[in-house]
Image (cartoon, helix red, strand yellow):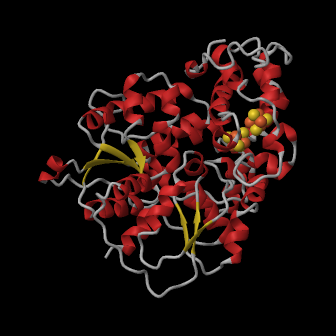
């Protein structure tokens, strides 16, 4: 089987273990699937993110291990000549949100989010891709090429007729709101040249599509905070030789999420080409949107991009991780004031990928720097939006059930509390389902600067 992703990291997995139960076909991809030891830990009621679709349905086909069992059957030839198109397998895989909960919480670290990307690519090679998937995958490119598209979500959100047509023809739930692009797009200011380079305080802010087009106040706040801390901030741009050179960089996550691996690889290559000179010059890459920045550390390593991607992955940090690292090294030169009179604790919701890649301890460390700022981290669970999952007609109900697991009860229990959430889709889910206005950490820190 020819795979779309590079699974060579698993080439020795299960080798020499008579009980590894590696499927007959699928090569290294099959070994990645067979990492699961069928312990069914993912089907027990437990705290944590894994596995949101099982937790709300109690259907064992929708647990991480259940998906593994179906995939093994497919790779062992039990589902006919077109195993990846099997409806039972398709249903189970479509209900995986790619939250990476299993990558952290499963005892054997099954990476179902990555397995799903390969699965979708294999299935679509046989069946083609739906119009909805194509639109969702391409919107970062189209938003740049056709700026008039920005007005469409607003129009659709205010028109019951358009919402119904969207559900009929595109399977986008008429019950759900679409995120609306901001009227102004973030545009990086001209670089300030100082002698800070000599002190090793140069950083590169990686602007993701969501911050750029939907919430430009977030990169503006991050730039303000980093500059206040004495860093010289620059912005990476696509290199002149790269494809579509005038278009801003995008990590390619929307393509990955829809299983369009070749398109995602092309986006990732532009990012790698643009960031490599910065990394080689000793600059740290900082990102604001967890799923985008963490793609550079995670999925990029499976795209066959070579040593350059490995180097970038070692120098890419989330905003909160970078600040926490600098604080630990006693290099963080920021002073915060109290944010008004002591009030009820703020609620912090972690994005699934922040939880999966261990970034929440950095959030905690940085929030503690604000004097008298009381906060509680909401018990980890998936918010249910997970990129486009929550607006897809067939998933809208489940998405709300997932939000009701721990997120919405926590918000309802503290109706006056400020909400901090670094994930774009989490903030959208919170705005729509709880009518609250969550903030990114960068915005909060800017307000708290002395
Ligand atoms: S996915 Fe992980 S937790 Fe679930 S059955 Fe397999 S090994 Fe156990
Ligand atoms: S990525 Fe998330 S939704 Fe998918 S199997 Fe793992 S825990 Fe479940």
Residue 93 makes an appearance in the image: no
Quadrant that contains the C terminus: bottom left
- Position of residue 8 in the picture relative to residue 285 (left or right): right
Residue 261 versus residue 227: which sits nearer the camera? Answer: 227
In this rendering, position of residue 237 left or right of residue 130? left
Q: Which x, y percent locates residue 10?
A: 61, 21
- On the image, the x and y values in percent for residue 249 come to 38, 40
The quarter holding residue 29 reads top right
Q: Total label count?
A: 0
Q: Is residue 177 left or right of residue 329?
A: right
Whether residue 437 is situated above or below residue 117 in the rendered picture: below
The one of 23 and 79 positioned closer to us in this rendering: 23
Residue extending furthest toward the left: 195
Q: Nearer the viewer, residue 137 or 383?
A: 383
Considering every residue shown, the one lying at the far bottom of the view is: 341
At 58% from the left and 57% from the top, the residue drawn is 350
Q: Position of residue 24 (x, y in %)?
A: 76, 11
Which quarter of the image is occupied by the N terminus? top right
Specify whether residue 122 is in view. Answer: yes
Q: Is residue 11 above or below residue 143?
A: above
Residue 401, image quadrant = bottom right
Q: What residue sits 64% from the left and 17% below the top? A: 28
Q: Is residue 154 above or below residue 25?
A: below
Instruction: Give residue 428's quadrant in the image.
Output: bottom right
Ligand 2: give its quadrant.
top right
Residue at 48 percent across and 21 percent down: it is: 304
Q: Position of residue 203 (x, y in %)?
A: 28, 48
């Amino acid at each position: 089987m020819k795979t779309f992703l590079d699974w060579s990291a698993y080439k020795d997995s299960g080798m020499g273990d008579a009980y590894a139960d590696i499927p007959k076909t699928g090569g290294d991809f099959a070994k990645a699937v067979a990492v699961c030891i069928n312990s069914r830990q993912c089907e027990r009621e437990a705290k944590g993110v894994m596995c949101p679709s099982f937790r709300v349905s109690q259907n064992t086909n929708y647990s991480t291990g259940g998906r593994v069992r179906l995939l093994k059957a497919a790779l062992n030839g039990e589902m006919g000549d077109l195993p990846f198109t099997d409806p039972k397998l398709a249903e189970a895989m479509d209900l995986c949100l790619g939250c990476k909960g299993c990558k952290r919480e499963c005892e054997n670290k099954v990476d179902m989010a990555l397995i799903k990307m390969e699965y979708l690519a294999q299935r679509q090679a046989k069946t083609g891709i739906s119009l909805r998937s194509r639109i969702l995958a391409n919107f970062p490119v189209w938003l740049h090429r056709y700026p008039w598209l920005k007005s469409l979500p607003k129009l659709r959100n205010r028109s019951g007729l358009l919402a119904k047509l969207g559900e009929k023809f595109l399977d986008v739930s008429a019950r759900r709101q679409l995120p609306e692009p901001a009227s102004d797009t973030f545009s990086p200011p001209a670089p300030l040249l100082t002698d800070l380079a000599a002190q090793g305080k140069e950083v590169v802010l990686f602007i993701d599509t969501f911050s750029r087009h939907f919430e430009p106040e977030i990169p503006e706040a991050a730039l303000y905070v980093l500059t206040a801390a004495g860093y010289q901030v620059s912005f990476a741009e696509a290199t002149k030789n790269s494809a579509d050179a005038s278009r801003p960089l995008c990590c390619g996550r929307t393509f990955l999420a829809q299983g369009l691996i070749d398109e995602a690889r092309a986006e990732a290559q532009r990012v790698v080409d643009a960031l490599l000179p910065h990394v080689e010059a000793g600059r740290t890459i900082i990102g604001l949107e967890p799923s985008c920045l963490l793609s550079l550390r995670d999925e990029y390593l499976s795209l066959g991009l070579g040593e350059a991607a490995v180097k970038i992955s070692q120098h890419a940090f989330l905003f909160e991780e970078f600040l926490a690292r600098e604080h630990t090294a006693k290099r963080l030169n920021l002073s915060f004031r109290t944010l008004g009179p002591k009030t009820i604790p703020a609620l912090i919701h972690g994005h699934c990928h922040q939880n999966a890649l261990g970034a929440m301890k950095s959030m905690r460390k940085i929030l503690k720097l604000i004097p008298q700022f009381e906060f509680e981290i909401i018990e980890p669970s998936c918010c249910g939006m997970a990129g486009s999952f929550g607006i897809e007609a067939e998933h809208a109900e489940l998405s709300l059930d997932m939000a009701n697991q721990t997120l919405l009860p926590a918000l309802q229990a503290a109706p006056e509390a400020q909400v901090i959430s670094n994930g774009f889709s989490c903030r959208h889910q919170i705005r729509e389902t709880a009518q609250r206005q969550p903030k990114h950490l960068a915005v909060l820190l800017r307000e708290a600067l002395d």
